[in-house]
Amino acid sequence: MLVEFSVSNYRSVNKAITLSFTSAKAPISKREHSCIETGFSSAPYLNEIAAIWGANGSGKTNILKALSFFRYFVKNSSKNMQYDEDIDIDNFAFSTRSRNDPSEFEIVFVYEGFLYQYGFAVDRKRVYEEWLYATPQDSEKQKPQRWFERDPDNIENSYVRPELKGPKAQWKSLTRDNALFLSTAVQNNSKDFQKPYEWIDNFLRIIVEPSSMPHGYSASQFANGRFQKQINKFMKDVDPHIHSIHTEEIELDLLKDAENIFSEEIKKEFAKKFKDKKGWEVYTIHIDDKNKPHKLHLDQESDGTQRLFRFAGPILDTLENGFTLIVDELHNSLHPLVMKRIIELFTNPKTNPNGAQFIFTTHDIESMDMLDNDEIWITDKDRNGQTKLKSISEFKGERSNKISKRYMSGRYGGIPNIGSLISDA
């Protein structure tokens, strides 16, 4: 379960901002507020939703890209980079000081009886700082344990908790300047560091560019029977004209459009590597005027229906496993009532019994009035182009009722400053 994520000096974010799932025990709300209980006194209750609104260009997407970079770097810094390779990081560009400072990322989460706090500071050449603290749930005072702190000058002098098992000196010596110690230790069979790495790798599910998301994941889940009933119901609930979904297995021909580009050896290598990989054609079944089923290829459906099918598999998978799903611009091509239905899947304990969480950006105003103040986040930019992030709960005396109207009036910021589109001349 994600408690909070902080980032500084990354893209449009200069000074540190924090997106938090921490929830009040008894918030003022127009609905019954279901929270996730963690068992940790420092963050006893967590929300299922963190929804971000803001004007175009205010930095909503950059927050999600920061999360995406964080996960990517943890997964790949030790195994997919060379010792002299630059780190693909974009710091805040409009400050001469920030251009030369490292970007910093930190995440706090709960997983299998521990509350972890992990972060690092990095520029294009190297990792400067890295830290990991772990608080065991069963300890009487729930005091954080220092598991790792990176020495910025010499990795060999870094602190590693003596009680942790494994060749700690070897892990330090194998950690490159442009790689994370956490990733390196896990690549070299650390059992203790495996747990926090596992959550970051498996439980953070990020879709920053939904428009380019293929339908393959939902199709494979459907074809394998895992979510067949649920996906059928999911699609029929939002589009009653769809009777059912149908998939047909096809052979993947990855070289079809480039057969004259690659050598025979490369083609054989591709064929060997992907020989057991399958794809699916997806069809919607409708009932015609003769009460007969008629098959329609998914590509012939509306953009909203196609997008909904692509979301179905990841959403159902997230709800079943208690993942944290992150989606940019959820509203695109989706009706507000469909948005409402998706949000309700996470806020209803019956459909979300495993503590799944959902972060999304949107411009859909109607969704605001479904959520509590501490689930609504606003991005804005100051005069220096820096992204600011705040929760509605920071505004004293606010109630969840009619938040959307106050947002549109400019009460919380985060709305575009639209001038005249027509010249007075």
Image: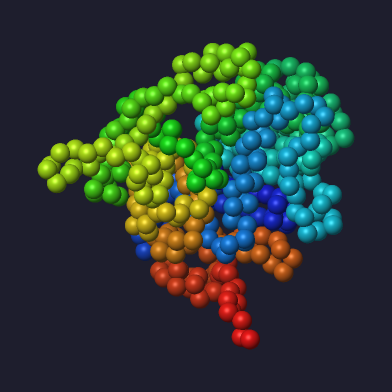
Q: Is residue 130 visible?
A: yes
Left or right: where 377 falls relative to 382: left
Pinpoint residue 408: horizontal percent, then vertical percent: 49, 72
Please give the name of the residue rendered at 82% of the width and 52% of the height, measured from the top-left corner: 99
Quarter residue 185 falls in: top right
Please give the name of the residue rendered at 62% of the width and 64% of the height, measured from the top-left corner: 380
Q: Colour mode?
A: rainbow
Q: Is residue 41 visible?
A: no
Residue extending furthest toward the bottom: 425
Instruction: Identify the image quadrant of the C terminus.
Output: bottom right
Compared with 386, 90 (above or below) is above
Pinpoint residue 53: horizontal percent, then vertical percent: 53, 61
Pinpoint residue 238: horizontal percent, then vertical percent: 30, 50
Please give the name of the residue rendered at 68% of the width and 49% of the height, measured from the top-left corner: 7
Residue extending furthest toward the right: 153
Front-lying residue, 102 or 280:
280
Front-lying residue, 165 or 54:
54
Left or right: where 185 falls relative to 285: right
Pinpoint residue 302: horizontal percent, then vertical percent: 36, 49
